Structure formats: C-alpha cells, structure tokens
Image (cartoon, coloured by chain):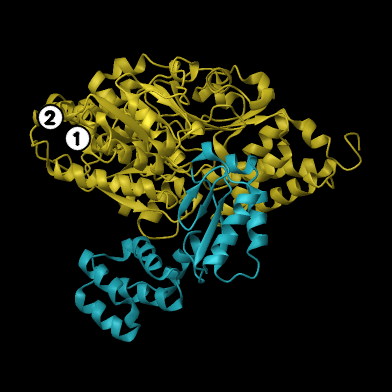
Chain colours: A yellow, B cyan
Amino acid sequence: MSPDDLDGIAARENASRKPIQIRCCTAAGCLAVGAESVRRELQGVLEQHPLRDQTEVIGVGCMRLCGFGPLVRRDPDGTTFAGVRPADAPAIIAGQGPELTPLDMHQPFFRNQKSVVLANCGIVDPERIESTIAAGGYRGLRDALTLHSPAEIVQFVTRSGLRGRGGAGYPTGVKWSIVAGSTDPNKHVICNADEGDPGAFKDRTILESDPHRVMEGMVIAGYATGARTGYVYVRGEHPLVTDRLQKAIDQAREFGLLGTDILGRGLIFDIEIRVGAGAYVCGEETALIASIEGGRGIPHPRPPYPGKVGLWGAPTLINNVETYANIGAIVENGPDWYSAIGTPTSRGTKVFSVAGRVVRTGLVEVPMGTPLREIVEVMCGGAPKGARIKAVQTGGPAGGFVPEPLLDTPVDYEAMAAIGSIVGSGGMIVLDETTDMVEMARFFMDFCRDESCGKCIPCRTGTVQMHGLLERIGRREGTRADVLRLELLADVVRHTSLCGLGRSAPNPVTSSLRHFRGDYEEKLRGGPKS
Amino acid sequence: MTDSITNQSVALDLGEVDARFGSIGEWIASQGLSNGDLMAVLHRTQAEFGYLDRGALGFVARALRLPLSRVYGVASFYHNFRLTPHGRHEIIVCTGTACHIAGATRLLEEAHCRAVGLKSVTVGSTRCLGPCGAAPVVVADGELLGGQTAESVSEIVARARHES
C-alpha cells in the first residue's frame, strides 16, 4: 500500500457508514457490568427494526465514565446513556423512550477533558483497522515516512518536551536519541504495557480502545531509531488487551503498515506480543527485558541502561503505552503544538484513571498542570454521599498520599514530587474521611512485600519488617519506638534497594507519616502520649 | 543460535518423556521456538493441562534445551503459573486498591469460607484487573463480574458446587 491509499481507505470507510450509529462500549469496565449482552440485544433488536437500513451497532472502546457502565452512545447527535440494560435496546434504537435519561455531556467531567491520547477512544472500533484509519489513524506515520528524516523525528520528540508516561518522567527525546545514535544494526523497540499499579487502568484502556495509536507510535520509533523489531509486554491479567492487540497487529500486517515494506517506503518493522504471568516487578524496565528473554523478572543494576545494552544485549528503546500513543499526534501536528499544552517542565496531556471513593470513576485526560482538585472534585464529583475527601493516593504502591489541603497542587512531575508523591503511571485513588491511613499504608506494603523479587536484601526483608510493624500498630499494639523503627527502615530501604520497586516501596509509609501522623499516634499503645 | 530446536530433537525427547505433550512439542517445532520463548511455552502448556506438574516442566526443559532448574525457577517466580492442580471451577477475587476499599477482603473471606472442603472449587485472589469502576470485581470461571457483594459471592460458590 502507498501513502495515498490511506485516504482511499478512509473515504471508503466513511462512505459505508450508516446515518445512525449506536456505539456500545466494549472495554473491560463496561464488560464487567454486562456490556456484551447489551450489544447482543441491540444487534438482535436492530435486525427486526424499521430503522435497520439507516442504523448500525458498533463496538467501541472506553467512553471514560467507567463507573456508570454499560455506556451506549447514539450518533450523530452524541446522546449518551449510562447503566444501559438489554431491555433498553428498542428505546435506544428508536432514539426515545420514557425510561431513558441521557447523560449531560456538558458537565465538567466531559467538558474539561483535553483529548490527545484518548481522541479516538469510544469512537473507533478497535477490532477494525479501517475504522481507525477513517478517524485519522496512521497519518502521523505517513507524515514521518514521507516528509521527515529519522533524525528530524527524534528532534520532534525532543522539542515536544514529552516525558515518560510510565511514572518516572524521563525525557523521551533523550532516550530516542541514545538508541538512534547507536551504530549497532540490531536494535529493539519495547512497549511497556505491564500496568501493574493496583487501581491504575489507563494503559489497559488505551490498548483495548485504540491499539493502532500505540502501534503507530512504535513504528515511528522504529523508523526514528533504526530498530526493526518491536515487542509489547502485556500483563497476563489483561487477556482482552492481548486479543485486541493481536487482531490489530494481524490487520496492520495485512494493510502493509507492519512488515517489510511499510507504506511502500521500504521500512522494515514488525511487532510481537509478549504476555507476562503476574509479577509486578516486571514493570521495571530491566526486569521486563529479563522476562521477555524468558527468565525470571529480576532487575539488573543500571547503568548500563537499556538504551545501550537492552534486550538480548542490543540497544533497546523502552517506553510506556501512553508515551507511544502521543507520538503520532506530535509528528502530525508538530512539536510546537504539543509543547504549547501543559506547564514549562511537564508538556502535553496526561491520562489519569480515577477510582476509589469518588462519585464518577473513570478515565480523565487533562493538560499537565491541572490542579488535582479540579480532577477529583470538579470533574469526578468528589467523595460520594457528601463525605469529605481525606486524601488522594497517586502513583500506586510507589506513590504517596496527597492530603486534602494540598489538592490545589498542579499535576506536574516536579510539583508532585515536592509534596512527597509522584504523577506515576496515572492511577488516582480517592480516599474519604472514613479511611484509616495506617491500614492503607499496610495494604500497599503488603503488596510490595508480596511482589518483591527477592534479589536485594533491603527490599526483600525490609518490606516484610515494615509490614509487620504496620500490622502491629494497626492492632493497637505498637509503641512510639515502633514508629521510629518504621521511619528508620523506610530510610534504609529507600536508599539501598536495587531497583525502583524497593526504592519507592516506603513512599506510602513516609507520606502517610508526613501528612497523617495523627492516624498513627491515635493507635499507639496507651494513646498518643505514651 | 545453537538453542533453536528442530523437529528431530523434539521427537526424540518426546519418546523419553511423555506422549501427552505431543501437541505442545509439535507447536514448539512448527513455530520454531527457542529457549527465549520459555514464558510463551509455559503459558501454552498450562492452558492445555490446567497446571504445570513435574512432568510438564521436565518436558518443557527438554524441548527448549534448558536445565529443569531454570524452568522451575521461572514457573515458580510468576504468580500466574500454577504448580498444583486446581478445581474445575475457579473463583478469583480482585484485591486491587479500588476493590480493597470496596470490601474485597470480606468477599475473599466469604468465598474461602463457602468453598472449604470443596475439591471442585478453587478460590484465589489477583492483583488489580483494571475495571475499577465496577469494584469490587470477581472473576468466576473466566467471566468478569462487577459490583459484587458477600451474598453474590456465596451464590457463585453455591452454583459452582451444584454444577460439579
């Protein structure tokens, strides 16, 4: 296929659309509450319906308001219905019915979003490449191959100011130029889709809803760096991601968007899936590489960084799902367009998954620098039943608790670090006033204790000891000396662990002690004054 | 790479190990898999047999020309590889943060309690599955179920027990 064929495919796809489209969410959040039976019923009712010649039912990805599923939208007017039951099918197809109340699409949850990564989520059918191409998919790749040299693409990524969306926030352009600068003919591109933070679901949702956007970013990465093979490392717990991604890869090969002559420009690049098997530490890049090589997911000390010595010893570019999902748009619209969004140190948008004690659970994409309060209170509606928010937990087990008075902090990498948390991979858990922070710290420490790979001693034994101390304090058997021991241990584990898992495991403890010491004191044996 | 295997070596190894792994051996040969594909081979073997016993691990080790210790090391490292048989029905409670806040611990206790002594029902837990909007979430025989309660979980166990 040639670059111009993309327009032909898009035109044919748009011409074949029926005037009324009923889009049914088929991402995991809605599937868990019965979206599949809703879709089947819509399809079944439509077959007998007078509107059948003008109407089609399309399975799409996430419509963002995950806590109110199953979600169904009736286009072209965009009327969206929440909590749809199979019995609602006739009314939705007809476009009216007494028991149907459409969602207010002008509420801040929808209105305040800025879509770059999620632009096609909930619009395209993730299982049909034509649908993605019609929505502008692979235009960034076409522009890259027809208008720019590989060096220019690396320049674009650098100038855009994009930073790693997996948590650490390392400048993406620096990584790209290291791999591009290597003369080794054998290089690899890896997409880290091992989204293991409990309560985080943005990578899973992006891949379930718009897999081609991520693949497009990887192919552009292959072009820019000279790598010919790409791997997506998917969690074993996300079978739907694996299924949809495999379909997307097969279709991209068929359409000449992967393979040995991409878009007729002679570019060689292919993508394979590697499925994990339940190990949180594999989200760490060196452990992930060890796992792809068929070993235990045990991290290595860095340097050397994967950019120099990575998969099978070759230079390897490894980025997060959301990072790759930004690339096509940056190439298509230019780095200046991208860097105009966000703050001076944190450019672009960020996708967050918001869950916990919150009125509107779901997926939010906002410009970097948006205050946390705007996200959890204005957009997501705060805690349910009029309860007060006590804290927002960001960054999963590696992150920290942001207390309510600090919710005006903007979400950018530096501002979050300054208050003892991290932007992290994008999971936000809202905790209301009933939450016991010692118990939350224990929950995360239990997680880290269980997921520690055991290679280095501070992490392996430190997490066990910290968990024991938190349990004891939780049982009201702890003393002031136990809190001191906890602080000392947290310090040792942070400074002496080998990889990010151990180094950040104490964060929930230190941040809860910093902001909620009262929760600990109140539990100490003999009361706060002992 | 010297570790890539041929049809011939698989056929030879099969004779020595166990005929029940014939289909896996053919798949390994047809895909041209090598020792770097250990994870994929373990996934496939478990999918076919339900769990990885000593014989299965031994077969994989020979087929990929790896030491058994290495294969066992990998299989025991990852939570999702099972070294012991499971019941016909599997009920998994998600214990991610959103589900934890929504009472997953109680659901897990309830499921364990109801399934005591039932060989056909295995109760387990998993780290976050991702559909946090539907918390707390349970996976019953592969089906994802949101908004669960202690009562609904106890019903799921009862149904599984009935079907056994």
The quadrant of the rendering that contains the N terminus of chain A is: top left
Please tell me which residue is depicted at 50% across the width and 38% down the height of the picture: A200
Say which chain tag 1 marks.
A
Q: Say which element carries label 1.
A: helix
Q: How many numbered dots are placed on residues in this image?
A: 2
Q: Is residue A43 visible?
A: yes
Q: Image height check: is B127 above or below A155? A: below
Residue designated by label 2 = A12
Residue type beneath disc 2: Arg
Image position of A253 with respect to A50: above or below: below
Q: Quadrant of residue A141?
A: top left
Query: In the visual, does A328 lie left or right of A341?
Result: left
Q: Position of residue A74 (x, y in %)?
A: 34, 25
Percent across and percent down for residue A511 are 66, 33
Along the viewing direction, whichever of A74 and A249 lies nearer the viewer? A74
Above/below status of A193 relative to B125: above
Q: Position of residue A153 (x, y in %)?
A: 23, 27
Of residues A251 and B60, the one drawn nearer to the viewer in this rendering? A251
Task: Let me know if marks 1 and 2 both belong to one chain.
Answer: yes
Q: Chain of mark 2?
A: A
- Crowd band around label 1 with a 10 angstrom C-alpha radius: few (<14), some (14–19), many (20+): many
SS at mark 2 in the image = helix
Of label 1 and label 2, which has the lower sequence position?
2
The residue pinned by badge 1 equals A130
In 3D space, how far apart are the residues under numbered discs 1 and 2 (Cα atoms)?
A: 9 Å
Q: In the picture, which quadrant includes the C terminus of chain A? A: top right
Residue at image coords 45%, 33%: A84
